[in-house]
Every structure is written in C-alpha cells, then in structure tokens.
Image: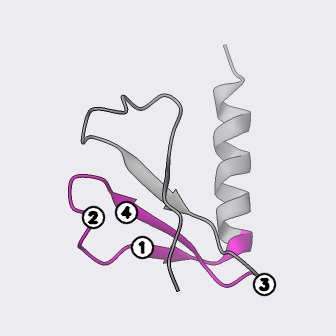
Amino acid sequence: MTLQWTRSSYCDSAGPDCVEVALPPGPATAVRLRDSKAPSRPPLAFAPDAWTAFTGSVERLGSRD
C-alpha cells in the first residue's frame, strides 16, 4: 500500500522540519505520522478514533485566545 503523505499548511514546503500525516485510503485502519527529516524511519500509527480525538482537542485549544 502506498501512502499519500501530507504536510501542514503552516509548514514551509522547502524546509525539512515538518510532521507529515497519511490518512487511510479505504476502510479505517490507522492514521500514520512521520518526521519529514527522517521519512525512511517507521511512522507512528494511531487508531482513527484516537486521531479524531487528538485533532479535535487541538482545534478546541487553538481557538482559545
């Protein structure tokens, strides 16, 4: 399976200091994260519900001013 890696829109496209995410292509299996400085290292894998909870928390915390 080939994963489609995506970087944050806040990340400098020319720089290597980014976290990249690959969402499952079909039925929910695992969301994967990797360090763009070391793409050949094994990615971290998270259950889709854990990823949804994490991103929801980040969004709620980010909306605090």
Q: Amino acid at mark 3?
A: Pro
Q: Are marks 4 and 2 in contact (CB under 8 Å)?
A: yes
Left or right placement of residue 7 versus residue 43 in this view: right
Q: Which residues are magenta?
A: 28-49
Q: Is residue 43 magenta?
A: yes
**What is the distance, in whole Å, between disc 3 and disc 1 at their CAs?**
18 Å
Q: N-terminal of the two: label 2 or label 1?
A: 2
Q: Residues within 10 Å of mark 4 (few under 14, many from 20)?
A: some
Label 3: element kind: loop
Label 2: element kind: loop
| Residue at 40%, 50% in the rendered image | 19
Q: N-terminal of the two: label 3 or label 1?
A: 3
Q: Eyeballing the image, is 11 above or below 44?
A: above
**What is the distance, in whole Å, between disc 4 and disc 1 at their CAs?**
6 Å
Q: Which residue is mark 3?
A: 27
Q: How far across and how far down the image is residue 59, in percent?
A: 70, 37
Mark 4 vs mark 2: in front:
2
Mark 2 vs mark 1: in front:
2
| Residue at 51%, 39% in the rendered image | 8
Q: Residues within 10 Å of mark 3 (few under 14, many from 20)?
A: few
Q: Which residue is mark 4?
A: 34
Q: How far across and how far down the image is residue 51, in percent?
A: 65, 64
Q: Which residue is mark 2?
A: 39
Q: Eyeballing the image, is 19 above or below 21?
A: above
Q: N-terminal of the two: label 3 or label 4?
A: 3
Q: Going by the picture, which residue comes out furthest to the top?
A: 65
Q: Residues within 10 Å of mark 2 (few under 14, many from 20)?
A: few
Q: How far across and how far down the image is residue 15, in percent?
A: 26, 34
Q: Which residue is mark 1?
A: 44
Q: Are marks 3 and 4 in contact (CB under 8 Å)?
A: no
Q: Amino acid at mark 2?
A: Pro
Q: N-terminal of the two: label 4 or label 1?
A: 4
